[in-house]
Amino acid sequence: MKQNNISPDTISYNAVISAVGKCGEWKESLSLLTSMEKSGVQANEITYSAIVDACYNAGNFADALRIFRQGLSDYTIPFQKSKSAIRWDLHKLSLPCACTMVSLVLLGCGKVKQESSQVPSLIFVTGVGLHSDPRKGPVLKGGVREFLVQHSGPSTKEVDSNEGCFQIEGADLKEWLFSYELERFGQDMMHPVSSK
């Protein structure tokens, strides 16, 4: 594009970032973000989501978390807070972005833990999802729960009144926060990947 005196814009950068990310080239997606910034082209939610997806799918959770914080934290992830629970709405996120968001929530809980405090339950609203197969059920709920199992996250439970949700009960979260599992989870999430 530059050879033809055409300046790339956000849409063209997003297309290339998405394409290289889907090919497993997460380092290239990060490099393109740097190029965007140096060129004065504004990244958006699509840009950051594509990069988080690329990093997450490569197992590079550290950069996925960093990019999520850098870009997607500006976009509101709806949540509601009551005395007994905090409810996060993950409907509009891809599976990699949803797992990254849940990781940020859990790592944040680890930073503010206190022995004597009551820990609220966390409820994650995943919905059925746009890409769900009716025969297989919701994509996000199963995918995020599987991610937590694979990476020593806290135990999860069904929400009886809503099949598009799962929860981490306050007692289970508190037990997890004061166990070695939090440290293992943090190590999994913060250990950068060097391949590719």
Image (cartoon, rainbow, N blue to C red):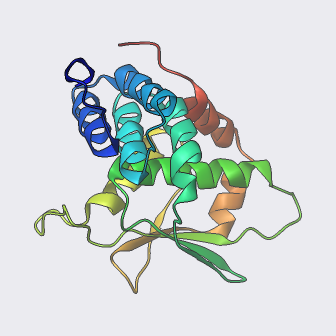
Side of 108 where 190 appears, left or right: left
Query: Residue 59's image quarter?
Result: top left
Q: Residue furthest front?
A: 5
Decide if residue 109 is in sight here.
Answer: yes
- The quadrant the C terminus occupies is top left
Give me the residue at 40% from left, 36% from top.
56
Quadrant where the N terminus sits is: top left
Q: Looking at the picture, does residue 104 appear above or below residue 164? A: above
Q: Is residue 119 above or below residue 46?
A: below
- Give 45 or 107, whichever is nearer the viewer: 45
Q: Is residue 175 left or right of residue 96?
A: right
| Residue extending farthest left | 135
As drawn, the residue found furthest toward the bottom would be 161
Q: Give coordinates of residue 158: x percent, y percent.
A: 42, 72
For the point 58% across and 43% down, the residue is 70
Nearest the viewer among 117 and 171 is 117
Identified at 19% across, 22% down, the residue is 4
Q: Position of residue 18 (x, y in %)?
A: 27, 37
Q: Point out residue 122 in the picture as x, y percentages from the top left corner.
A: 59, 68
Residue at x 12%, y 69% (from the top left corner):
134
- Residue 31 screen position, x and y as percent: 42, 22
Give residue 58's quadrant in the image: top left
